[in-house]
Image (spheres, rainbow, N blue to C red):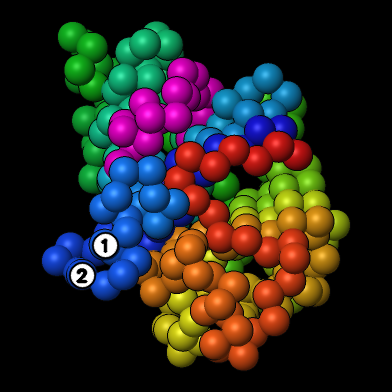
Amino acid sequence: MKITILGSGTSTGVPEYKCECETCQDARVYGSKNYRTRSSIHVESAGKHLQFDVAPNFIDQIDRNKIDHIDAVIYTHCHADHISGTNDLVMPCRKQQIDMPIYGPEETIRIIQRNYDYMFLKDTFQGGGVAHLLPHPVAESFSLFDQEVIPIPVQHGTVVTYGYRIQNFGYVPDVKVLPEASLQLLQGVDLLIIDALSFNPGHPTHFAVQQAMEVSEKLQPKATYLTHIMHRLDHRYFPEQCREQGIDLPDNIELCFDGQVLDL
């Protein structure tokens, strides 16, 4: 399995607009790992290409990372930073000459159908300027191209939100509360990518670094990568930042960065 981190940032992206903090200044330097587009990953497994979320930066993300094929899109939830690139599915659909199957929580699929109604009507597909989407609401484990995909229900604000598990890989980019039943669904993963917005455990909708580490400690994956990260976390100084917070950073936990490729 090959996992490409298309975006590792929170909803604002990094650099933040009009922010002159050290991290944002560094993020404006070409090649900086602190440059973060909105959270999204691309997974190649068993010969199929699965796109998880379609961020505002989607078309740039897949072009920059040379993603030349998408077989299906899987949405985690309906927040704008995870669905607002949906219109740009027109190019993968056009280049591949396919209708694109999409999967996600029923609420998310319903909102996408409302916001992009023209993408679900065959008569608007004429001329090639509109993608045609095939909706599949999911609430439990489902088979996709002969692979089991397991939704991981989490609490994240007021919208229905899933992480997902495929084989020994777990992806949970937006989470504030991970229920025990969902934690059990992640048992045995070797690779975990999980939300860690900042060092503030009081944020109402996202894990802090400390909380993500607690989940990693319980699951004991071989490697944990932190995503959906804001400008208060700096790749250049992250171990030092952890020490300043009184956090002992395990060797198997790192920050994600845009363009990172992980093999499992």
Q: Are marks 2 and 1 in contact (CB under 8 Å)?
A: yes
Residue at the extreme left of the image, as rendered: 18
Left or right, 181 with respect to 229, comes to right
Looking at the picture, does residue 190 appear above or below residue 63? Answer: below
Q: Quadrant of the C terminus?
A: top right
Total numbered badges shown on the rendered structure: 2
User: Which amino acid lies under the numbered mark 1 shown in the image of this protein?
Assistant: Gln
Looking at the picture, does residue 131 appear above or below residue 73? Answer: above
Residue 13, given in percent of the width and then of the height, sits at 31, 58
Near-viewer residue (247 or 191): 247
Near-viewer residue (216 or 244): 244
| Residue range highlighted in magenta | 57-75
| Residue occupied by mark 2 | 20
Q: Quadrant of the N terminus?
A: top right
Left or right, 171 with respect to 201, comes to right
Q: How far apart are the two marked residues, 2 and 1, measured between alpha carbons?
A: 6 Å
Asked if the stretch drawn in magenta spans residue 192, the answer is no
Q: Earlier in the sequence, mark 2 or mark 1?
A: 2
User: Which amino acid lies under the numbered mark 2 shown in the image of this protein?
Assistant: Glu
Q: Is residue 159 visible?
A: no
**Residue ID at (17%, 63%):** 17
**Residue ID at (68%, 64%):** 253
**Residue ID at (37%, 35%):** 61
| Residue occupied by mark 1 | 25
Could you say whether the residue bearing mark 1 is in a helix, strand or loop? helix
Q: Residues within 10 Å of mark 2 (few under 14, many from 20)?
A: few
Residue 62, given in percent of the width and then of the height, sits at 40, 30
Could you say whether the residue bearing mark 2 is in a helix, strand or loop? loop
**Residue ID at (46%, 85%):** 200
